[in-house]
Every structure is written in structure tokens, then in C-alpha cells.
């Protein structure tokens, strides 16, 4: 429980620091970018959803793989991604995990099996299937955790990928991190039928639904599903119901949201619940405070590292495109 | 090495079989591949290598390509089959945003050695959704190599090369060439971005690729009978394309005509022509299809085709314009 709390606290601290650094960083609807903003462009924060990343990734080894969404900082940290290099990536610096080429929406750390966040909804699912198929062909015992949101269940590749994973009995844990919003519109009014778990079951992918704001519940359900995958029972789905606290993207002030619904999301804070649960399970306040202090120091260090890292060399705009046929070609 | 007399489709089968024997990472994913593929371009491969490596898939183009990306990232060398380029449009996100961008946007952490087979060209009387030549769309896309083999030997050599590289390759065979016979030397591997100069003339440079190379060659014969000596260059690889060879020939002949099956407007011929005009100051023209969908009835389909006589006419016009410009 202590470890789950630590993971969640690290994610929360990262998101809050990124949010602070992004103030004024988006030029939208005529607004001018504040030149002092360190983090630019769209920033999708997972504040309020930390329990899903922490509870699922606690079951993954370094060799297991992970695909993520545009809201992927938490998954990356929980998989073991380097916080310093992640923050430097958000800052658009040469020392970033992607050398400043990806930013928040494409955060990735292949060295720990995190195969990338994705700017396109549902795009991670087919990639996760292929990664799992490769693991199976190579005779490796690892699995792929594939995170996606509720909005993704209305795109075609969702059907294709779940069917595919079931047909080939691939070791994929599909995790629907359901924050109830398709960008800025409630998913409930856009989705017919009895929901994602039923859709998955109809495609031969069984699973469980869990309270996504209860890290112990997520952890327990993910543990059972991972065990089934390791037992050769094929792909599984975890439907984790959670709440998005911030807007779809950092500049989204959520004027469309029912105040009661938003207050409910804030009240359901999974980090506070995890803290209370840890105390109830025997952790001491001193232990938790010590974790909080460690996390503060870590995030301060990550921000300082990011800030000290230089901007990318413009020449690097021409590298890592392709081996044959690269170059400016003007 | 002995020459083997075979077809364009079988040349690809041979290239794949040799690659799969040499490299256990090479696998095939696609619809109907177990039965040999709808054009027999996978004939016998599942029997030889098993259903684990020649994988029959659902009709799920997005996931065929997306899974190919995932496999490639985890150390495999997948070949994904789209039947015809027209169907690859169901997988455009996976091709454009995933396969082509992966290496760059993740800062070089991964590689996507993925060969995507997207045949272009006419499929007689198959109408608008089975007869497109969309190579320019992909040449426009940073992150991919684009290959358009014109002969059985090219199909062998270029596919072999594609399977050895570390880039995503848009591999565009031609729907009309599957049965084309020719000699194949299995020891040859293509050099990416190297054009084939099929003949040299002093009056005019004809540049083409894929099935239109035959059109251009036939036109060159007819032009020769009219006293116009034309070079014929098969680009083969559209990206990267062999600028050196093309520009050197244009500098010599001072006249360039690019010929392709694709719609002329916004076609890759415009890129070649503009580059040549800028670099050499030569007179340029391009000839592609009118901007119409391909019709079903033969008489409608024919309107969308570039004929050798149309090439001859365009070439003569180009010669006449050049002569007039010189006189003036």
C-alpha cells in the first residue's frame, strides 16, 4: 500500500508541477503564448486518475510493455519512466526522453517498456496487439498493458483490436480508464449499449470493473486479470471507473461541467483515499510524510534538471526520421 | 547466378521466401495470405513457414498495420498486406501517424522496419475503389520509403532490399503487373533511390515508374520512328528519388516529360518536373490521368488511362514548344 501511495504521489506531483509550468503556454482562440511558459502546447493531466496507473502498473515487470494515451504521464511514471527526462521532454529540451521531439502527448520511455503515449485516440490498441503478438512469437512470458479512455471505445480500432487479441489469444491487459468524458462531452450520451465491459465480452475478452479511485480495488482486480493472462487465458479487460478533475486539456476550464459532478470528482480524490487507506493498514503518518518529502525533493530536482537542459539543436529536426531518404530535400 | 523466368507476383514470393528463410523475424500479416493472397503474391508461403509466420488476419486494416507497428517495435520485421492501396485508406492513421512518425516523435527510441504492400494501378473494370494510384500521397509523407517496382526483377530486388532496411516502406506493386513475365536474378538487391535508365536519347527525357514505364517505353519506340530520340528512366523508388540521374539526363536533353498513371494534378510528376526545371532550366511537362474517378465501363476506364499515343503527343508538343522558345 505504501508503494502504491508513493507512485500516486509521484504522479500527482508531476502533474501539478507540469500544470504550473504550463501557465500561459497555449496560444488558443487568439490568446498569446506567455514567453515565460516552460511547457507549451496541449497538456492533458491525469489528476484524479492516479490510482488506475498505480494499481495496474504495480503488477508489471520491467520487461512487460505498455501503450498509453494522450493522458500518459501517470502510466509512464508508474512503469518506471525517468521523471527528470520526462519533465525535460515537457519543457521541450534536448535532455528530454524524446529529445524534445514529442512533448507531453508523445511521452515515452522505451528503456522501461513504455512504448509511447499517443496523440490519436484508440491508436495504442492495435500497436499493443502487435507488441503482444511479437512477445508470443518470441516465446517470451511478458504481457502488454494497454491503456485507453472511454472515448476510445467508440472508434473502430477498438473493435478490431479486441477481436484481434481474442482471435490470437494475446497477452494483453486492456485497461479502459473511464473518466466519463470524450474530450469535453459526456461519454454517456454518446455511447449506446451496456458499456465497455459488455462490448469486450461480446468480442471474447472477459474482464472486471473496478472503482478506479480506489487503488486497492484497481490493484486487486488487475492482479487477478494479470494472473489469468499468465495462465494462458488470453486478453483481459479492466474497466476502471474514475473521474477527471482537470479539463480535457490544460486550458479547458470545464464550463460545460455540472458543478456537483466536478465537486464529486474532487471529493473522490484517490490520493487522499490512498493515504487514509495506508494509515488504516498500519502505515504511520511519519512514513507518509517522509514519502511526501521525498516526492517533493524528486519533483524539484526534475524541474531543475528540465530547466537546466538546453533547447534542442535545430539540426536534430532532421535526425531520426528515416535511414534511407532522410534530409531536408529542399 | 542463374536467371529464373518467372512472374512479377512470383518474384515477390521468392523474395519473401528467401528473406523468411534467412531471418526468423520476418513475418507476414494480412487477409487471405494463407491461401496465397488474392494475387498469389504469397503462394505457398504458409505451407512453407506455417500459420504462425504467415498469419491470416480478420478484415481489420487499421489493426493489420497497427499490429505491424507494434511487432516491429518489439523486434520483428513484419510485412503487412493491404490487397490494394484503396483499402489501405482504412489504415491511414496507422500508416501516417503511427508507422511513419514513431521513430521521430519518440526521439529515435524505436525503429519500425515494416513493409506495407499497397498495390497501385488499374484493376480492369473494377471501378473507382480498386484502381487508384496514390503514390504521391505517401511520397509526401516524411518517415517512409516509397517503392514502385516495374518488373519481376525489380519486385524481387526491391522487396529484398525493403526487408533488410530499418525504415517503414510503402511498397507499391502494380495490380496490372502481377502476371508480367521476366528474368529474375536472385542474387540482386536493389540500391534504394537508384533509378534504372532503360535507354538513352539526346532529344528528350521520359521519366516514369510502375506500370507507366511500359507506356513510356512504347511511346519512346513510336517517337524513335518519328525521329525523336528519348531517354527512358524508371525511377523505381519514389522516395528517395534519384535526382542525380534524372537531373543529369535533363541537363543533357534539355527536355523532360514525366509520365504516370496517377491523376496528374498534384501528382509526383509535378515534383520531378519542378525540381528539374529549377535545377537545370530544362523545359518540363508531365502527363497523368485527368482528375476523374476511374469508371467501370471499359470506355470510361480508358478515359482515365494514359496511352502511349498520348505520351507521343505530349512529347511532340514539348519539342515544338522548346523549338519555338529557342527561335524566339
Image: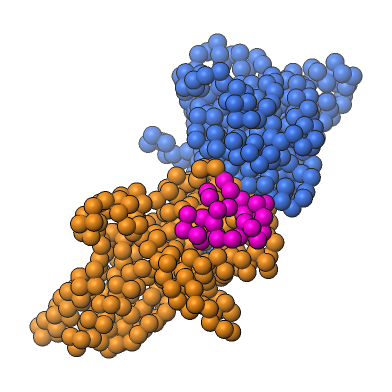
Residue B124 versus residue B237 in the image, above or below: above
Q: Residue at x 23, y 86 (%)?
A: B224
Locate residue B298 relative to residue A272 in the image: left or right: left
B179 or B289, nearer to the observer: B179
Q: Name the tint of chain B in the rendering.
A: orange
Locate residue B205 relative to residue B239 in the image: left or right: left
The image shows residue A134 at horizontal and vertical percentages of: 68, 50
- The span picked out in magenta is B31-57
A91 or A54, nearer to the observer: A54
Quarter of the picture holding the C terminus of chain B:
bottom left
Q: Which chain is blue?
A: A
B229 or A163, nearer to the observer: A163
- For the image, the number of numbered tags is 0
The image quadrant that residue B133 belongs to is bottom left
The answer to whether residue A209 of the structure is visible from this angle is yes
A168 or A310, nearer to the observer: A168
Amino acid at each position: 500500500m505504501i508503494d502504491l501511495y508513493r507512485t500516486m504521489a509521484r504522479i500527482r506531483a508531476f502533474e501539478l508541477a507540469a500544470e504550473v509550468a504550463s501557465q500561459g503556454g497555449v496560444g488558443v482562440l487568439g490568446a498569446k503564448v506567455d514567453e515565460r511558459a516552460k511547457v507549451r502546447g496541449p497538456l492533458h493531466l491525469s489528476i484524479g486518475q492516479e490510482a488506475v496507473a498505480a494499481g495496474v502498473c504495480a503488477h508489471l515487470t520491467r520487461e512487460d510493455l505498455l501503450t498509453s494515451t494522450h493522458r500518459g504521464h501517470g502510466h509512464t511514471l508508474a512503469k518506471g519512466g525517468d521523471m527528470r527526462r520526462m519533465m525535460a521532454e515537457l519543457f521541450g529540451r534536448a535532455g528530454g526522453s524524446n529529445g524534445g521531439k514529442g512533448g507531453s502527448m508523445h511521452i515515452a520511455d522505451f528503456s522501461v517498456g513504455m512504448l509511447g503515449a499517443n496523440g490519436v485516440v484508440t491508436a495504442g490498441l492495435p500497436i499493443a496487439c502487435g507488441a503482444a503478438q511479437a512477445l508470443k512469437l518470441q516465446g517470451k512470458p511478458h504481457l502488454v498493458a494497454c491503456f485507453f479512455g472511454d472515448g476510445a471505445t467508440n472508434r473502430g480500432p477498438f473493435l478490431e483490436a479486441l477481436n484481434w487479441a481474442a482471435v490470437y489469444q494475446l497477452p494483453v491487459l486492456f485497461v479502459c480508464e473511464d473518466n466519463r468524458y470524450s474530450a469535453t462531452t459526456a461519454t454517456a450520451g454518446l455511447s449506446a449499449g451496456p458499456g465497455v465491459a459488455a462490448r469486450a465480452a461480446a468480442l471474447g475478452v472477459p474482464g472486471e470493473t473496478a472503482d478506479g479511485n480506489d487503488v486497492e480495488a484497481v490493484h486487486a482486480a488487475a492482479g487477478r486479470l494479470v494472473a489469468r493472462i499468465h495462465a494462458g487465458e488470453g486478453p483481459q479487460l479492466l474497466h476502471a471507473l474514475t473521474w477527471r478533475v482537470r479539463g480535457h486539456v490544460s486550458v479547458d476550464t470545464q464550463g460545460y461541467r455540472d458543478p456537483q459532478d466536478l465537486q464529486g470528482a474532487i471529493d473522490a480524490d484517490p490520493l487522499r483515499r490512498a493515504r487514509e487507506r495506508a494509515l488504516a493498514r498500519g502505515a504511520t503518518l511519519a512514513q507518509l510524510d517522509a514519502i511526501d518529502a521525498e516526492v517533493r525533493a524528486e519533483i524539484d530536482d526534475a524541474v531543475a534538471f528540465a530547466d537546466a537542459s538546453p533547447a534542442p539543436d535545430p539540426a536534430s529536426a532532421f535526425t531520426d526520421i528515416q535511414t534511407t531518404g532522410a534530409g531536408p530535400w529542399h | 547466378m542463374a536467371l529464373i523466368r518467372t512472374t512479377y507476383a512470383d518474384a515477390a514470393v521468392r523474395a519473401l521466401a528467401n528473406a523468411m528463410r534467412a531471418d526468423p523475424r520476418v513475418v507476414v500479416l494480412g487477409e487471405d495470405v494463407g491461401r496465397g493472397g488474392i494475387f498469389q503474391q504469397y503462394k505457398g508461403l504458409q505451407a512453407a513457414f506455417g500459420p504462425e509466420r504467415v498469419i491470416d488476419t480478420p478484415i481489420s486494416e487499421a489493426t493489420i498495420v497497427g499490429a505491424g507497428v507494434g511487432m516491429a517495435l518489439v523486434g520483428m520485421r513484419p510485412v503487412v498486406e493491404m490487397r490494394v492501396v484503396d483499402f489501405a485508406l482504412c489504415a491511414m492513421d496507422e500508416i501516417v501517424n503511427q508507422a511513419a512518425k514513431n521513430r521521430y516523435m519518440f526521439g529515435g527510441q524505436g525503429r519500425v522496419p515494416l513493409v506495407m504492400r499497397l498495390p497501385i494501378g488499374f484493376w480492369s473494370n473494377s471501378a473507382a475503389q480498386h484502381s487508384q494510384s496514390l503514390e504521391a500521397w505517401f511520397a509526401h509523407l516524411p518517415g517512409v520509403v516509397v517503392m514502385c517496382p516495374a518488373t519481376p526483377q525489380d519486385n524481387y530486388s526491391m522487396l529484398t532490399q525493403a526487408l533488410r532496411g530499418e525504415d517503414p516502406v510503402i511498397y507499391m506493386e502494380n495490380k496490372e503487373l502481377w502476371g508480367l513475365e521476366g528474368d529474375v536474378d536472385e542474387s540482386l538487391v536493389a540500391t534504394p533511390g537508384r533509378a534504372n535508365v532503360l535507354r538513352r536519347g539526346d532529344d528528350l527525357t521520359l521519366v516514369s515508374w510502375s506500370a507507366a514505364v511500359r507506356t513510356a517505353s512504347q511511346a519512346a519506340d513510336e517517337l524513335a520512328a518519328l525521329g525523336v530520340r528519348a531517354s527512358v528512366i524508371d525511377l523505381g523508388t519514389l522516395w528517395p528519388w534519384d535526382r542525380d540521374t534524372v537531373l543529369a539526363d535533363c541537363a543533357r536533353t534539355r527536355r523532360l516529360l514525366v509520365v504516370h498513371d496517377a491523376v496528374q494534378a498534384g501528382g509526383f510528376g509535378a515534383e520531378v518536373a519542378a525540381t528539374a526545371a529549377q535545377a537545370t532550366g530544362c523545359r518540363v511537362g508531365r502527363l497523368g490521368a485527368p482528375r476523374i474517378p476511374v469508371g467501370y465501363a471499359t470506355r470510361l476506364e480508358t478515359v482515365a488511362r494514359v496511352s502511349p499515343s498520348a505520351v507521343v503527343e505530349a512529347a511532340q508538343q514539348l519539342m515544338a514548344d522548346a523549338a519555338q522558345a529557342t527561335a524566339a
